[in-house]
Each structure stands twice: as C-alpha cells, then as structure tokens.
Amino acid sequence: MLIQKKIIQSVRDKCIQDKSVSACMMYGSFTKGEGDQYSDVEFYIFIDDDKVENFSSRLWISEIYSVDLIFYNDYGTEVVIFSNMIRGEFHFLPESEIEIIRSFKPTGVFPDTDSMYIYDSTNQLKPLLDDLGGDGPDRMTDENVNFAFNNFVNTWLMGVNVMKRGELARSLEVLTQVQKFILQLIRVKEQTVERGLNSTKNLEEDISTESYNDYAAITSTLKEKEIKNAYKSALKLAEKLNYILAAHYRVEVNKDLISKLHQYLKK
C-alpha cells in the first residue's frame, strides 16, 4: 500500500475520533485516480464552530503521522512535509464555512466525488460533493481563448521590455507566465482543457509530440540569447495558434498586432 493511502486512512481515523471535527473532504490526485508514490495528500477539514478557538491544527496534524515541517504558504494553506518526504496540504475551516465547497465547481472536473468524502457528522458534505459532479467548466469558448491570447500579449510585451532593459532574471520569470497562457491555447487546440488551471500537469501525456516540442522551444535558461530566442519562438507559436484558433473562435488579437510585436522584438 502507498504511504499516502496510510496517511489518508490516518486522517479518516483521526476525524472519527476527534469530536472537534465536523467534516473532512479530500481533493487532488487521489480523488482523480492519478495518485502515485510522488503525489501530495490534500484535505479540507471543518471544525465545530464552538471548538475552533481552542483547536490546534499543528498538534492535530502531528498526531496523524510523523512530520518534519509544518508552515503556511503564500495562499494561507497549511503545508506539511511528512518525515517520509510526502507533502500534505490542509485547510482548516469552521463548520459554518462548509458551503465554500460550492465554489470549487468552476475550478475543474471532479470525476469521482465519492472518493473526496472522508468524514461527515453534519449530513451536509455528501450533497455538496455531489453538486461538484458532472461536466466541468466550458473552457472551449471565445471568452477563454481571448483571455489567454490577451494575457499572452501583455506578459510577452512585459517580458521583452524588461529583457531589453537588461533585467534578464525578471524577463525569465515573466516567461513562465507567457508559457502558461501559451499552454492554455495549446490545450484548447488539442481539446485537453480539463487541466486548464494547471496546464503543465501530465503535459507529457496530454498533448501531441508536436505541441510538446513547440512548448520546449519557448523555455530557457538564464542566458540572454536563449531568453530572446524563447520570446521569439513564443511569438511565432502564438501566431500559429492564432491562425488555427481564429477559424473556430472570435479572436481579438489579430495578425496585424502580432506583426507589430515581431517588429518590436527586432528593435
């Protein structure tokens, strides 16, 4: 048995034993049939409102499995590095905020909501999880295609400008945003938009070899020539995607604007 599954079972057992816990759900790879030895474990745990004030999440987590590190990341998520080098993410919220689960629907596809269920003493969790089922958000739309194209232009121009200023490290950082929006467009082209919010996940399996090679061409190390070539390749790829997608979507970024960007890069 994978160690992650032992941790999941330990979380379930702890929820059953601890009267402070009202409900618990899991999300991530193990709810999508994709969990393996390298996957994280991720939970939302709802605490009885009357017990929140005296509840210690750090103590609660440390009693599940041996841990080496517990901290809060930039998003306010409690992150755990278990002693076996498995990562965990824990969101502890009052029971009165359990309706937050409804807000997950626009974020993606939830193929097996039953696997998300860990524990519930409120009779609220199962109906909320059931509502997450079915088709995910429609990302094959004019709105989403334009969102990706428009943000590509914005981040591409920013990255080129700081590169021309000589800020190569910053230009390389912006390049990751350029890549993100290009990948969103590639996924629309190849109709693999289920991972629209995490476009690099399983990329090696989700897109064609041609598109993967196109993506590889817009990556770079911290060398001026490589960075410039990456931005040049990104613009060429955007032009290619614009031609393909404009046949199916009303795209606001036109070939004249892309031509101007080509000229700007040469200056």
Image (cartoon, grey):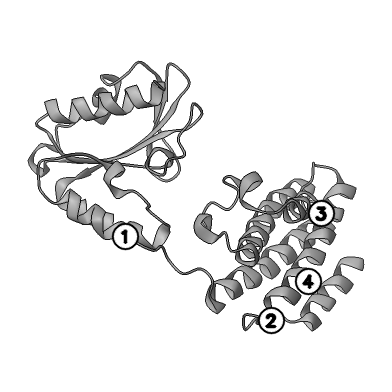
- The residue positioned 17% from the left and 32% from the top of the image is 55
Pointer 4 with pointer 3, Cβ within 8 A = no
On the rendered image, what quadrant is the N terminus found in? Answer: top left
User: The residue under label 1 is which amino acid type?
Assistant: Ser
State which mark lies toward you, 1 or 2: 2
Q: Work out whether residue 225 or residue 34 is closer to the camera in this orientation and state it.
A: 34
Q: Which residue is mark 1?
A: 103
Query: Counting other residues with Cα less than 10 Å from the Cα at mark 2, is it few (<14), some (14-19), or many (20 or more)?
Result: few
Tell me where residue 261 appears, x and y as whole percent. Answer: 81, 73
Pointer 2 with pointer 4, Cβ within 8 A = no
- The residue positioned 43% from the left and 57% from the top of the image is 108
**Which of the two discs, 3 and 2, labels the residue nearer the N terminus?**
3
Q: Which residue is mark 3?
A: 230
Residue 154 vertical placement versus 85 (above, below)? below
Q: Which residue is mark 4?
A: 239
Residue 115 is left or right of residue 235, and the answer is: left
**Which of the two discs, 4 and 3, labels the residue nearer the N terminus?**
3
- The residue positioned 41% from the left and 56% from the top of the image is 109
Residue 185 vertical placement versus 29 (above, below)? below
Pointer 3 with pointer 2, Cβ within 8 A = no
User: The residue under label 3 is which amino acid type?
Assistant: Ala
- The residue positioned 31% from the left and 29% from the top of the image is 8
Q: Is residue 97 visible?
A: no
Q: Which residue is mark 2?
A: 247
In what element is the residue under mark 3? Answer: helix
Pointer 1 with pointer 2, Cβ within 8 A = no
**Which of the two discs, 2 and 4, labels the residue nearer the N terminus?**
4
